[in-house]
Image (spheres, rainbow, N blue to C red):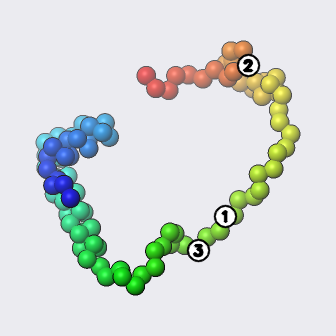
Amino acid sequence: MAEINEETIKHLAWLARLKLSEDEIKEYVGQLSKILDYFKILDEAPTENVEPLFHVLDLVNVMRDDEPGETLSVDEALSNAPLKEGNYIEAPRMVT
């Protein structure tokens, strides 16, 4: 497993688009190292006779069957749109 150092934290912060202070970077080195050390302890747990588990809860799919129904016409679908261009709803830009 790779060592957690300040460069690792800076890289993770860059990936997450976070701006961290030097104090925060040092704090996160320690915190993330402790978390990964805990996983090393879990690696030592005896699991030879344990069946693989795909989901911890015994759930079944509770959604209804997907059945086609009536659809709106283009005019009905666009009737409440505040802005439209042709047959499309125009929305403000979200990502700059």
SS under mark 2: loop
Spot occupied by residue 51 in the image (x, y as percentages of width and height): 46, 79
Is 8 located above or below residue 55 in the figure?
Answer: above
45 lies left or right of 84: left
Label 1 is placed on what type of residue?
A: Asn
83 lies left or right of 56: right
Frontmost residue, 94 versus 44: 44
- The numbered mark, 1 or 2, whose residue comes first in the sequence reads 1
The CA distance from mark 1 to mark 2 is: 36 Å
- Badge 3 is on which residue? 58
The CA distance from mark 3 to mark 1 is: 10 Å
The residue positioned farthest toward the right in the image shown: 70
Spot occupied by residue 60 in the image (x, y as percentages of width and height): 65, 68
Residue at 67% x, 18% y is: 83
Label 3 is placed on what type of residue?
A: Asp
- Badge 1 is on which residue? 61
Please give the count of numbered marks on the rendered protein: 3
Is 1 located above or below residue 70 in the figure?
Answer: below
Q: In the picture, residue 91 is in which quadrant? A: top right
Spot occupied by residue 68 in the image (x, y as percentages of width and height): 82, 45
- Badge 2 is on which residue? 87
Crowding around mark 2 (Cα neighbors within 10 Å: few <14, some 14 to 19, many 20+) is few
SS under mark 1: loop
Is 40 located above or below residue 91 in the figure?
Answer: below
CB contact under 8 Å: marks 3 and 2: no
CB contact under 8 Å: marks 3 and 1: no
Residue at 27% x, 67% y is: 39
